Image (spheres, grey):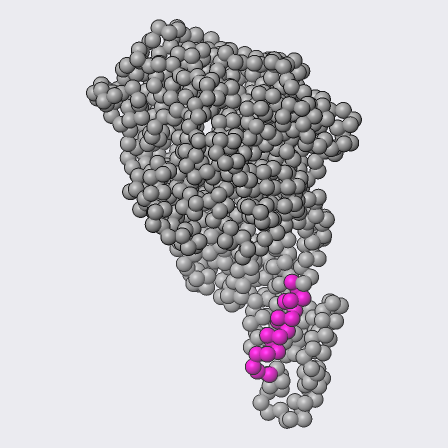
Amino acid sequence: MNHIMTESAEVTTQSKGGYVLEVDRLVTEFDTPDGTLRAVNDVSFGVRPGETVCIVGESGSGKSTTMLSALGLIKKDGGRIAGGEVRFNGENLLRMSKERLRRIRGREIGMIFQDPMSSLNPVFTVGDQLVEAVRLHQKVNRAQARKRAIGVLSLVGVPNPEVRFDQYPHQYSGGMRQRAMIAMAIINDPAVLVADEPTTALDVTIQAQVLRVLAKAQKETGSATILITHDLGVVAETADRVLVMYGGRIIEQGDVETVFKSPKHPYTVGLLNSQPRIDENAERLKPIPGEPPNLAALPSGCVFSERCGLRQGREACTSEEPSLQETGESASHSAACHFWPEVRPPVHEQETISVRPKSVGENAPAETVLEVTELKKHFKTSGGLFKRGDKPVRAVDGVSFDLRSGETLGLVGESGSGKTTVGKAALGLVGNVDGTIVFLGKDIARYGRSHLRPIRKDLQMVFQDPYGSLDPRMNVRKIITEPMWIHGIAPGENGVEHLLERVGLRASIAERYPHQLSGGQRQRVGIARALGLRPRVMVLDEPVSALDVSVQAQVINLLKEIQAEDNIAYLFVAHDLAVVHNMSDRVAIMYLGKIMEIGDRAEVYKNPTHPYTQALLSAVPIPDPGARDGEGRIVLKGDIPNPSSPPSGCVFRTRCWKATEKCAIEVPALEDRLGIGHPSACHYPDVPQKNHSVTARV
Amino acid sequence: MLKLIASRILAAVPTLFGVLVATFLIVHLIPGDPISAILGDEATEEQIQTTREALGLNDPLYVQFANYLTQVLQGDLGTSISGRQPVADQIMARLPATISLAIAGVIASVIIGIPLGMLAATRRGGKTDFSALLFTTVGEAAPAFWTGILLSTVFAITLGWLPATGAGTPGDTWSVIRSLILPATALGLAGMALIARITRSSMLEVLNEDYVRTARAKGVREWVVITRHALRNAAIPVVTVIGLNFGVLLGGTVVMETVFARPGIGSLLVNAIFARDYPVVQGVTLVIAVSFVLVNLVTDIVYRFLDPRLRDEVTSKA
């Protein structure tokens, strides 16, 4: 990247550790009605040029607040920095004039935020926002700035940068917006790049693209990078060093290999054990008990003591706060645990411990409860009075599958794949569908409301958003009993307390309201509500994607236990391939309203024959730094096409490296061409070799 | 944009037709007779019948309406019953004074309301915020005629800085502007209070948006963050309120024209109602309805100017 001469002098007063940015005993507090919260408590670390430091943690760990405080960007309402220093090239950012800080922000320190949807200003063109970023810090005219902006857009892989320059953010796709955001952050060749959950809002194939762009941008600028994330896979993929945060503190830090291979804090171990992985076969996850800490009521002593399995009632854990101690595992590896030598490494299970009585094949042959054939749902977009309506959006375009009692079918896909619509349609919640949906011998596809009502109790749904799907004005008891009352089911044996116990909640929660519960508790209430009706089929629509990793593992285990006890059939709709791998017996991979590949879970994950499945699986970051696989990874080009005008022939062909003329003409049928036991919809299926050498394209 | 304007104008046709029907019916169904207003109580039965016949009042309602509609489409709003003048001429003579008063009222409410709201938002919770809130509460609570009289007493009668009555000498721009200041301020006060409040809450919301944080992270000066990055995003609900408020202001001109003895559409309408002068009432109502439609059109265009997402709504939905 060409260095444009800038007004700021090249300051090279670096600190002892050679850090370009150094956070030193930072404390950030927020005043709330519950008292003063310490969101960041005595956090110290530094980052060197060219190095990537990942800050990893669950919600409330203080990982984002740390960096926002460092740059003076915390919300003004009651937030303040109560102590410490943040030094950029030796200068304290927290004490300098507003004008000096302004000159450093965006010039020396670039920031990338989580949600590319909301982080770009909707009323200015992307070009305007890039030009503004250049001209704030460099004395160049508009034409020069434009040239520079187009150059950077092209560097981050935005196609047709000259045209894209004049477009508004809403005309960009999510992945393109994040590229534009990265372009804006690196346009002035910053010394430090801070990325706050840069890929969390993106689909996994787009995440792979963006991570690659980030790595490229860092290489070009030679900047020090601080990447904030909750995703252990992304950490393993990108980090040189890792900081693990919990309850506002750093509880473990070190180089990425040591932290993943021999972590010395029980929380880090718990986090790694909670994470489902596509390369492992743990039937049952080992979650951390409890919930991430409430900053208003932190335990005394060690912040993790309440959830820690290592504590075993020892007094030191509750009386004295442990400080970071060198463990000697590797240089600068340290952990804040009194008993760190006792910490055992995370468990890697390859063997299968079956916790569920397998109904399939063992007892009586499992009954098919739901049979969906050639399901189609086309949404019409309305035109105005004088406009023609657009083409219909083919949300679901010919999907067939069956579901047996006691089994889980995982429905995986990226945004726009139609997976949620399939889930809702299977419950008769979508009107005007084509095809058949046979529930226990009856085709409910064209049932009216009154016909559906008696069946509804057999077909239940658990929703993604545990905040939006519970009525805030009802207490838990009412939330759970209302559907039972509607269907005339006497609480009795299925009483609220019993249901709460089954989902792992205390009976006293019955009198609480949703806002008094944590995300995990709300999701459990949502499951209890569905369970009260003793359903035969449950559609789980992204039931754990809003939860922290440690809580997610608890809910996954709970769902499995319930299924084993009640023999319920689950249609598990999700985008997270690792979670689907852990939950499902069979999986169906969806793309643009069609099933690309369907079959036994282990079969599909081990021998994916459809290029899309191969790309998806290859894009999932594995939480193991040893498994970094930069070159062998398949990175798909481009975005998911608009479902209102899907490509002709095979819908995946526009992003497929195998596509030929035939693919543009002939729709591939879903069939087992290779005779390996499960079908895929590709003209040229193959079983990939390890480290297949597909040319990666960004 | 041209297509938008064309489609909006077409869509206004049924609205205007509805207005015509409604005013026609209301005027004809309210009790009272224009004949007695024209001829006085002394008129003979024969005189009354002749006049009724001449004015077409003996025809069935639908015939009267059809005749009226034909005239309107030709630009003829009829002849005033009491004044014997074409209604269109009467309206055109008084329209500029009213429109300029309403526009001046809007300008007064905007140039004070928006900065006040921005100031309150950026100093949230401080003394400035509190004072602005107090000012807007008082401004909203005070009736326009009262503030009008108050302003007139202080600035026109006691201090003598500005004229207390009239609409200025036509052609003398300065005198026209001077005559507008007091009634426009009184008229704009309630609107300015509303605009300040909406601006404040909209700004507070926008200042919490991620893109404002992005702007700060880029190193944009705080002043530029507020005026460039935040204000344009915060403006949409404010424009809605300004548009709605314009209607209230048009109604308010009736009062202000009375308090400040200004000739205008408002006073014309009030007099016509008392005189049962159907054509005038209908004509004025129609003109007010048309100006509502125009204001809505302008609001719509301003939305699209402010927010590019609205420019290609249909394509972005897909």
Tell me where the magenta segment starts and ends, as one range: B15-33
For the residue pair A75 and A522, the one nearer the viewer reads as A522
Q: Which residue is pictured at 47% across the width and 39% down the height?
A: A568
Instruction: State which quadrant residue A566 falls in.
Output: top left
Relative to A112, is A306 on the left or the right?
left
Q: Residue at x 61, y 30 (%)?
A: A598
Q: Give the x, y percent position of residue A351.
A: 46, 18
Q: Is residue A402 visible?
A: yes
The answer to which of A585 and A307 lies nearer the viewer is: A585
- Position of B231 with respect to B293 (left or right) is left
Relative side of A277 to B67, left or right: left
Question: What residue is drawn where x is 56% and y is 81%?
Answer: B31
- Would you say residue A250 sits in the magenta stretch? no
Query: x%, y% of residue A307?
Result: 31, 26
Residue A333 at x, y percent in the picture: 38, 10
Q: Is residue B26 magenta?
A: yes
* Above or below for A449 versus A263: below
Q: Nearer the viewer, residue A585 or A37?
A: A585
A199 versus A35 height, above or below: above
